[in-house]
Image: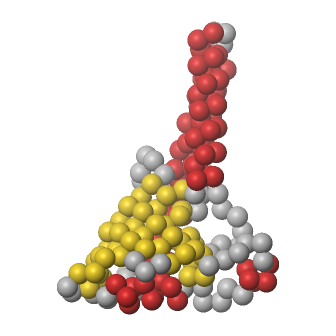
């Protein structure tokens, strides 16, 4: 488990770049979340996002909201014997903002209670809450990365060995 909500991975595939992008493209849908009819017709679709010629920006299809769902940024490069897939898993910007914001607010309260008002218990509680907030975010992000990795590997015909 990483101490920051970020994960990278490099995969080597015997498939060509075009074949890899085709596999990803077949299982990915560009979604307008304001159109409820489009959200209901998701049979066979594993990811939402955008797939370009050599890169993609996708996230796992979910049925209910999940704050710690990773955004998968990928780039595919050709090699003489197949392709190399570079993946970065990270929190969506809005989720990252709230994790950082609440951690900093709680650390600010800790500094206030320990530095100015000399309430050691209140400062300790705020520090504990800041640490719990951050480590729960990292834990749940890591769990979602494992699920997203498994789905992605399945799409491009990899077998995960965990």
Q: Residue at x 47, y 73 (%)?
A: 56
Q: Quadrant of the C terminus?
A: bottom left
Classify residue 22 as left or right of residue 126: left
Return the residue nearer the eye: 64 or 91: 91
Decide: is 50 above or below 134.
Answer: below
Picture coordinates of residue 97, whole percent (x, y): 61, 46
Classify residue 156 as left or right of residue 103: left
Q: Residue at x 79, y 78 (%)?
A: 36
How has the structure been colored for display? secondary structure
Decide: is 99 above or below 153.
Answer: above
Q: Residue furthest front?
A: 53
Picture coordinates of residue 125, whole percent (x, y): 64, 26
Picture coordinates of residue 111, whole percent (x, y): 58, 19
Instruction: Please tell me in which quadrant of the rendered image residue 153 appears.
Output: bottom left
- Count of number-bearing discs: 0
Return the residue nearer the eye: 86 or 134: 86
Is residue 47 in sight in this rendering? yes
Return the residue nearer the eye: 121 or 43: 43
Is residue 150 in sight in this rendering? no
Q: Residue at x 62, y 52 (%)?
A: 95
Q: Residue furthest left?
A: 80
Q: Residue at x 66, y 77 (%)?
A: 31
Picture coordinates of residue 117, whole percent (x, y): 67, 9
């Amino acid at each position: 488990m990483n101490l920051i909500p970020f994960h990278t991975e490099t995969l080597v595939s015997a498939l060509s770049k075009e074949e890899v992008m085709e596999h990803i493209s077949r299982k990915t849908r560009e979604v307008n979340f304001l159109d409820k009819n489009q959200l209901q017709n998701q049979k066979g679709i594993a990811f939402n996002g955008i797939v370009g010629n050599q890169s993609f920006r996708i996230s796992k299809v979910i049925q209910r909201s999940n704050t710690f769902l990773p955004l998968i940024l990928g780039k595919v490069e050709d090699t003489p014997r197949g392709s190399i897939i570079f993946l970065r898993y990270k929190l969506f910007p809005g989720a990252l903002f709230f994790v950082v914001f609440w951690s900093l607010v709680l650390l600010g309260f800790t500094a206030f209670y320990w530095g100015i008002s000399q309430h050691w218990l209140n400062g300790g509680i705020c520090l504990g809450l800041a640490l719990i907030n951050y480590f729960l975010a990292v834990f749940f992000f890591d769990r979602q990365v494992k699920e997203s990795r498994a789905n992605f590997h399945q799409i491009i015909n990899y077998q995960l060995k965990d």
